[in-house]
Each structure stands twice: as C-alpha cells, then as structure tokens.
Image (cartoon, helix red, strand yellow):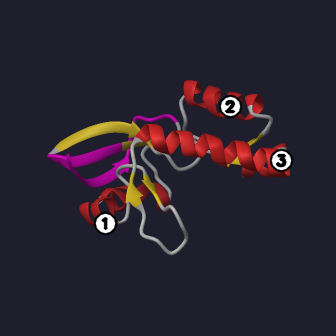
Amino acid sequence: MKETKSTCPYCGVGCGVIIRSEGEQITGVRGDPDHPANFGRLCTKGSTLHLTASAEVTLHTRLLHPMRREHRGQRPTRVGWDNALDFAVESFHQVIQEHGPDAVGFYISGQLLTEDYYVFNSWPRASSAPTTSTPTRAFA
C-alpha cells in the first residue's frame, strides 16, 4: 500500500488528505494530521473522496476522453481534443453573440492552482463573458 499527500478538491479550505492506493487504484483517504488547514479532520465529502475514484465509478460513469453528440437522441461518440475544444469555443462564441456576455459564466473549484485561476479569470474577460464564481465566493 502506498500513501500520497494531497489537497482535497472540494471547497476553498484546502484540507490536507493522505490518499491510500494499491497499484493504480485509490483505496482510501484520511485527513493529514500535519496539515494546518484541517489537522487531520475531514468533512463528509473529503472523507469519501476515494469512493469517487473507484474502478466502478471511473470506468463506468466518468468521461476519460471528449465525447460529442451530433443531435439530440443520438449516442455520443469519441472525438479528439482539438475537435472538442474548437466546438466549445465556437459554441461559447455563438451564445455570447446571440444572448450577450452575461449568458456565459463559470463556476470553478476553490482548489485550482494560481495559474488555473488566471486562465479561468482571463478567458471570460477576453471573450466578454465576465462571470466567474468559486465555492469560496459562493459560501463566503
């Protein structure tokens, strides 16, 4: 069994977690007693992180690559990253053109890295869609 220190991704507190794994499979999680944000304590979401990374969840309910459905009612098919990102950009652009900049917003994790926040806060401004919110802001 291997243990890896990390940060809980749920809210903006940034609790320290210790992830237990066997091979590629996460088998458990516990609070990091040395972490100053939580001193080993975890909320319900944090203490069940390992359940969201189980093989059953990962292989059967999580997307592992981009998928696109051409028309409602059709089955989604796998597409490449360039295709998926181009489609997303075109779709955001179309919504903003038709409905204005307030029609698009982002609700992002409170646990992004500084660089990730920069991207999420810069892209909406550059595209005239200024609304970005995080759990930290929502629950403050």
Q: Is residue 137 magenta?
A: no
Circle 1 sits in a helix, a strand or a loop, which is it?
Answer: helix
Residue topped by disc 3? 102
Residue 60 is tagged as: 1
Residue topped by disc 2? 123
Q: Nearer the viewer, residue 90 or 130?
A: 90
What residue is drawn where x is 30% and y is 45%?
19
Residue contact between numbered discs 1 and 3, judged by CB atoms under 8 Å: no
Looking at marks 2 and 3 on the same chain, the residue that comes earlier in the sequence is marked by 3
Mark 1, other Cα within 10 Å: few <14 / some 14–19 / many ≥20: few
Stretch in magenta: 18-36
* Type of the residue with mark 3: Asp
Could you tell me how far apart the alpha carbons at marks 2 and 1 are, in whole angstroms? Answer: 32 Å
Could you tell me how far apart the alpha carbons at marks 2 and 3 are, in whole angstroms? Answer: 14 Å
Q: Position of residue 69 (x, y in %)?
A: 48, 62
Q: Nearer the viewer, residue 140 or 133?
A: 133
* Type of the residue with mark 2: Trp
Residue 57 seen in render? yes
Circle 2 sits in a helix, a strand or a loop, which is it?
Answer: helix
In the image, residue 61 above or below residue 29: below
Q: Position of residue 123 (x, y in %)?
A: 68, 31
